Image (cartoon, rainbow, N blue to C red):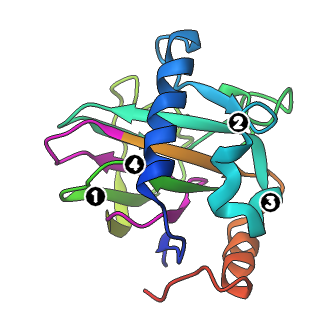
Amino acid sequence: MKCCYELNIEISDAYKERVKEIYDLCKDDAKKDVAPDCMRKEFPELWAPIEPVADWFSPVVRMLYEPPGQKVVKHIDLNAHAQYGDAGRYIICPGALNIPCFKPIGDITKWWRQKNPEFIHPYDFWKGKDHDMVEIDSFEITTKPVMLRTGVFHSAENNGNENRLMVSFFTHWTVDWDTIIDVMSSNGLLLPR
């Protein structure tokens, strides 16, 4: 099972600089545990690199910022940050298109499947609980934008020595993983893996 694909989308240095400027504008409005959100109507330039497929994604983009060495525990992405408005906090986000605006060095994302039928709350790992899981995929993030499967448990490690800033576009919650991969492929954006 493949849970991540690089995309044939070129990202200019000017775009990365603009992302940093927008992050600096928005970061103080974010809650402590929430990445800043930016709306498409306010910052349409953020959507420019993904224009052929932009309407497949939420009009809310998240600016993900992590310091060196940070590990993101296993989790499933949810509507906890209201990228789907009032659709409900526990709506699962099937996929995300992430654009790295940093120089990744060994940054690994892993995907996991549970090994038993017990109920696992999406926030269990954030709360320090552990569950028996098996790794089903892993991918090293490079400078290319990626399509990530976020509707299954996944974790990330920032192994580089610089701050990690990414623009994260979530698919609409009714767009399943197979559909968005087909959309990317039919638009010539999906790179073979």
Residue at mark 4: 101
Question: Judging from the image, what secondary structure is the residue with disc 1 in?
Answer: strand
- In the picture, measured across the screen, residue 63 lies left or right of residue 127, that is right
Spatial distance from mark 4 to mark 2, Cα to Cα?
17 Å
Q: Which circle marks residue 56 in the picture?
A: 3
Magenta residues, start to end: 142-164
- Frontmost of labels 1 and 4 is 4
The location of residue 18, given as percent across then percent down, is 51, 39
Spatial distance from mark 3 to mark 1, Cα to Cα?
26 Å
Residue at mark 1: 108
Instruction: Tell me: residue 51, above or below residue 171.
Output: below
- Prevailing secondary structure class for the magenta stretch in the rendered image: loop
Amino acid type, label 4 = Cys
Estimate how packed mark 4 is, as few (under 14), some (14 to 19) or many (20 or more) residues with alpha carbons within 10 Å. Answer: many
Question: Judging from the image, what secondary structure is the residue with disc 2 in?
Answer: loop
User: Mark 3 and 2 residues: CB-CB less than 8 Å, in contact?
Assistant: no
Residue at mark 2: 43
Estimate how packed mark 1 is, as few (under 14), some (14 to 19) or many (20 or more) residues with alpha carbons within 10 Å. Answer: some
Residue 144 forms part of the magenta stretch: yes
Spatial distance from mark 4 to mark 3, Cα to Cα?
22 Å
